[in-house]
Image (cartoon, rainbow, N blue to C red):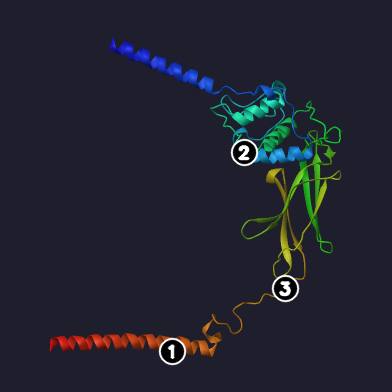
Amino acid sequence: MKKNILNILSLISISLLIVGNVQAQNWTIDPELKDAQLKIAYDEASIDAGKSVYDKNCKACHLEISAEENNSRAAGAAPNLGNKEFNKGNTDGEIFCKLSHGNGSSMPPYEAMLSEDDRWKVIAYMRSFCESYEGPKADDGAAAVVAEKFEGEISKLDLSFDKDSKVITVQLEGKDSSGNKVVPKNVKVSVFVKRAFGQLPLCADKKTDDKGQITTELGDVPTDTAGFITLIASVNGGKTTAEANVQVNEGYTWVNPLDGTHLWATRDKTPLWLMIMYFGGTLLVLGVIGWSVLQLFRIWNLRER
């Protein structure tokens, strides 16, 4: 009888846990936002800003977004938010509510962590993977234009530097899935200066033009003594890189700061007056210590007497 009671209690507990977990995963959709459309302009600026927010807050769980017919992720894993089934089955407002409130279980609420504007930008980035999506018009009444994504493969990356104008040029070459040569347009390129510890960014995620290239000014960057620096260009999040050692100027002669006469340098370059003060002070301290020891010795003799 006792065993049956324990079995019944265990069954009830498991049932309550299952029901509670299912209820916790319910999405809260605000009625006034259920059919809402994107509340920001659907353009390249919003999409790029949304990608930045997504990479910082969502990518750790949802990984890279890719355009697919259905979610290909394993059960229980965070879904690929670029699948067409998700995009067609949810309005902008519904996605906004899910992002804001979470589901009480695997999806945390971002209402307090992200501004309303940032949440709409994330949705704009997600919608950019859906070709059939039509975003709201810009303020001037014109339809928002989203640049065509480069779907091919980067086959070559050239990095050059003009010493006179101090302009860096990065030229990309690509090929499509059939191996035909194509111009990589709208590909994000980042340029850095190599340092002993880390890299100094010059430009980040600058998009290539219709010729497949970007240009950026070097600015005032320290060089080595021969006037050289090492430039690094990267695309696809660092998957493809190019490196070039270029000469910026004629260099300079390094002067050792310890050369000459200084207050704190090697002994043979220390001013005479400082050495006199140092040794004089040392002798004075030693004299005081010796005098103190002598007085203690005299007190000891007096005590013995």
* Residue 206 horizontal/vertical position (percent): 77, 47
- Residue 18 in the image: above or below residue 102: above
Q: Which residue is mark 3?
A: 252
**Which is nearer the N-term, disc 2 or disc 3?**
2
Q: Which residue is mark 2?
A: 57
Q: Amino acid at mark 1?
A: Gly
What residue occupies the far front of the structure in this picture?
Answer: 32
Q: Nearer the viewer, residue 232 or 204?
A: 204
Secondary structure state at the residue bearing disc 1: helix
Task: Classify mark 3: residues with Cα within 10 Å, few (<14), some (14-19) or many (20+).
Answer: few
* Residue 294 horizontal/vertical position (percent): 26, 88
Alpha-carbon span between mark 3 and mark 1: 42 Å
Which residue appears at 70% of the width and 75% of the height?
253
Task: Classify mark 1: residues with Cα within 10 Å, few (<14), some (14-19) or many (20+).
Answer: few
Q: Which residue is mark 1?
A: 280
**Which is nearer the N-term, disc 3 or disc 1?**
3
* Circle count: 3
- Residue 116 in the image: above or below residue 8: below
- Labels 2 and 3 touching (C-beta < 8 A): no
**Which is nearer the N-term, disc 1 or disc 2?**
2
Which of discs 3 and 1 lies nearer the camera? The answer is 1
Q: Amino acid at mark 3?
A: Tyr
Residue 254 quadrant: bottom right
The quadrant in which the N terminus is found is: top left
